Amino acid sequence: MATLPDSLFGEPSAAERTTAPKSNTSHPPNSDLNKVSIEKLILALHNAHTRERALQLLSQNRSRSDDLAVLIWHSFGTMFTLLKEIMEIYPSLSKPDLTERASIRVCNALALLQCVASHPETRVPFMKAKIPLYLYPFLNTTIKEKPHEYLRLTSLGVIGALVKVDDKEVIYFLLKTEIVPYCLRCMDVGKGLSKTVSTFILQKILMDEEGLRYCCLVADRFFAITSALETMMEKISEEPSQRLLKHIVRCYLKLSESPRACPGLAKLLPRMLNDSAFTDLLRDDPTVMSSFQQLLRNVHENRLRENEDEYGTPKTVQAAAAATTAGRYCLFWTFPFKLSSRFKKASGR
């Protein structure tokens, strides 16, 4: 009877390799992988000696096969192999000495997951299997070194591929798994492209009715979002980014459409949005410029509503009317006393 391996989740030990029967499947060496088909590259993922090179080639040639996502999802053990690659780097995430080679290897695995997340046939099964949860540790890191940034950005790319197609089920899944705090973390510690992708994900969440309600339901959550957006506005003043500014404007616009959030937003909207340096970045895109103007209108109309009573009368006019009425009220009561004093003088009393 064959001896079982010590762990079903690891590579076989040296003793197991010597006693195990040889497989009939031959794996080409790394030098020959450039010439093999996509199907054979997927098979090469199952061999520890060819896995790194196969990951690299599959990641580079994702556009060669429209069915790559389907092949990855349905081929036996491939998704397990990709997740195994991802989980093996978890212990290194808290260390600043994570090597660039190890990071790129995992990024190649993440790129294949992005392929699966973006395919219409595999996107929903990918989400229902809760595969995105394996990416959240990469979004939670605060280390800003380049290897960590690679992992952060590629993981955001997988989530971005999920939200690119408007699907309420995807938004509900992301809200349920608390993606918003991870996006805010990436907006804070990530570099330019990571900030852009994480803001795009937040924008797609806000564009959904349930996502907007979620973001505005709790005051702390709303203030955390507006604070992160304002911080990025300050970064843009130092390093202008048209793409990032577009996503920020759209996030503010969706927040302004919430009756619950707009009153607070009117007080928290950064004044630098009115700076000509920012508006000049938007002039090339009429759609975003229109969104920006609509944002200002929403905030202005909310301020007007706050200054009106329930009948639509401006509170300033109402206050003036109240002052006039009070004056008349005073005259009404003082006039008889003045008249009576004059009457007393006239009568000699």
Image: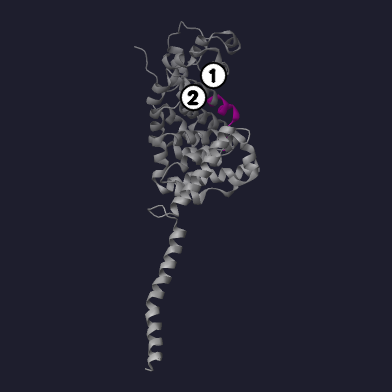
The kind of residue tagged 2 is Glu
Q: Is residue 316 left or right of residue 284?
A: left
The crowding category of the residue bearing disc 1, from other C-alpha atoms within 10 Å (few below 14, some 14 to 19, many at least 20), is many
Where residue 111 appears, as percent x and y from the top left, is: 52, 23
Residue 64: quadrant of the picture: top right
What is the span of residues highlighted in magenta in the rendered image? 96-106
User: Distance between the Cα atoms at labels 1 and 2?
Assistant: 10 Å
- Residue 102 shown in magenta: yes
Above or below for 220 versus 340: above
Where residue 188 appears, as percent x and y from the top left, is: 54, 42
Q: Residue furthest bottom?
A: 348
The kind of residue tagged 1 is Leu
Task: Identify the image quadrant of the C terminus.
Answer: bottom left
Q: Label 2's element? A: helix
- Residue 316 shown in magenta: no
- From the image, tell me which residue sits under label 1: 55
Where residue 59 appears, as percent x and y from the top left, is: 55, 19
- From the image, tell me which residue sits under label 2: 85
